[in-house]
Amino acid sequence: MRLSTTRAALGTALLLIVFSGCGGDAAQEAAQRTGGDSQRGRQHMLKYGCASCHVIPGVEGARGMVGPSLEGIASRTYLGGKLPNTPENMTLWVRDPQSVSPGTAMPNLGVTEEDGRDMVAYLYTLK
């Protein structure tokens, strides 16, 4: 009986280790991939007015219907219908969408390099 209890405890511990490392902390993973800070990025979504055009999970009042919902954007294959979804490409899209797709409804908002990295870090938490 004691051996089966020990095995069960070890099995549970192993599952906890596997599952805690499987998805990892989304913010930490996003920071490693992007070099940005997701908490600041979430705040920048309001600063730059992203919430007026997009639904953005986790951003208060972000219920815009002009642009697409950003729910699950980290799992999408393409950005803006043209760019492979990489941190570098997402930063380019956030900072200068007109250079990627001239005439797109998404305007250039003057997003700085640092703010762009932070915003992309937040967007990469949205899986």
Image: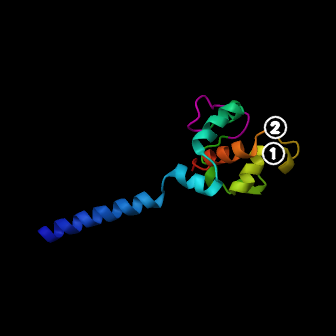
Horizontal side, residue 93 vs residue 39: left or right? right
Label 1 neighbourhood size at 10 Å, few (<14), some (14-19), many (20+)?
A: many
Residue 52, horizontal then vertical, whole percent? 70, 30
Give the residue at x 63% y 31%.
63
Q: Residue furthest bottom?
A: 3
Residue topped by disc 2:
107
Secondary structure mostly seen in magenta is loop
Q: Is residue 96 visible?
A: yes
Quarter of the picture containing the N terminus is bottom left
| Vertical arrangement, residue 107 with respect to residue 30, above or below | above
- Which region shows up in magenta? 57-68
Q: Is residue 19 above or below residue 57?
A: below
Vertical relation: 64 (above or below) 83: above
Asked if residue 31 is among those painted magenta in the image, a careful observer would answer no
Q: Is residue 109 above or below residue 123?
A: above
Q: Residue at x 68, y 55 (%)?
A: 87
Relative image position of residue 11 (x, y in whole percent) = 28, 66
SS at circle 1: helix
> Residue 82's spot in the image, x, y percent?
79, 55
Crowding at label 2, few (<14), some or many (≥20) Cα neighbours within 10 Å?
few
Q: Which residue is mark 1?
A: 97
Q: Are marks 1 and 2 in contact (CB under 8 Å)?
A: yes
